[in-house]
Image: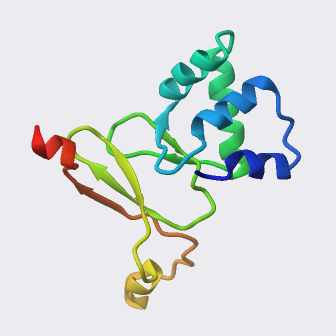
Amino acid sequence: MSDLLERLRGRGWRMTAQRRVVAEVLDGDHVHLTADEVHARAVARLPEISRATVYNTLGEMVTLGEIIEVTTDRRAKRYDPNAHRPHHHLVCARCGAIRDVHPAGDPLADLPDGERFGFTISGVEVTYRGICPNCASA
């Protein structure tokens, strides 16, 4: 389980019922939901929550750096609460399932100085693509 709720409380973020429900829906390992999926799950817990509130809350959490927007291919943005532990993503090319992976080593070290073209590198995003076990067995 991620520590999203604790991180938000620690920042002094005003925890309304709507914000709490959105954070609870996102809390967990390997959670990469679209805004519509967050909304559907939030409505199940708090029927009066609006789609606009969910989108606004997700935007605020991204701005705070407490969740990450993940975009793979041309699919909808997904939201990842694993914002404070460096990781990469493993994506199924068929169903779009996403898993966090934590390979050993430093991906920055894999980029030779000659390939940096004078850039000061601030981060690395690696996406592994393949077919998940569910799609492979179908």
Question: Taking 44 as reference, is 98 above or below it?
Answer: below
Q: Nearer the viewer, residue 108 or 5?
A: 5
Q: Is residue 63 left or right of residue 105?
A: right
- Measuring from the top left, give residue 59's x and y in whole percent: 66, 36
Q: What residue appears at the point 22 percent right and 46 percent down from the top-left corner?
A: 93
User: Furthest residue to the front?
Assistant: 1
Q: Is residue 80 left or right of residue 113?
A: right
Q: Quadrant of residue 57?
A: top right
Question: Taking 124 as reference, is 96 above or below it?
Answer: above
Q: What residue appears at the point 39 percent right and 88 percent down from the top-left corner?
A: 112
Q: Nearer the viewer, residue 81 or 65?
A: 81
| Image quadrant occupied by the C terminus | top left
User: Furthest residue to the top?
Assistant: 48
- Measuring from the top left, give residue 14's x and y in whole percent: 87, 36
Q: Is residue 102 left or right of residue 68?
A: left
Question: Taking 89 as reference, is 74 above or below it?
Answer: above
Q: What residue appears at the point 59 percent right and 16 percent down from the top-left corner?
A: 43
Q: What residue appears at the point 57 percent right and 16 percent down from the top-left corner?
A: 44
Q: Quadrant of residue 121?
A: bottom right
- Measuring from the top left, give residue 89's x and y in whole percent: 39, 57
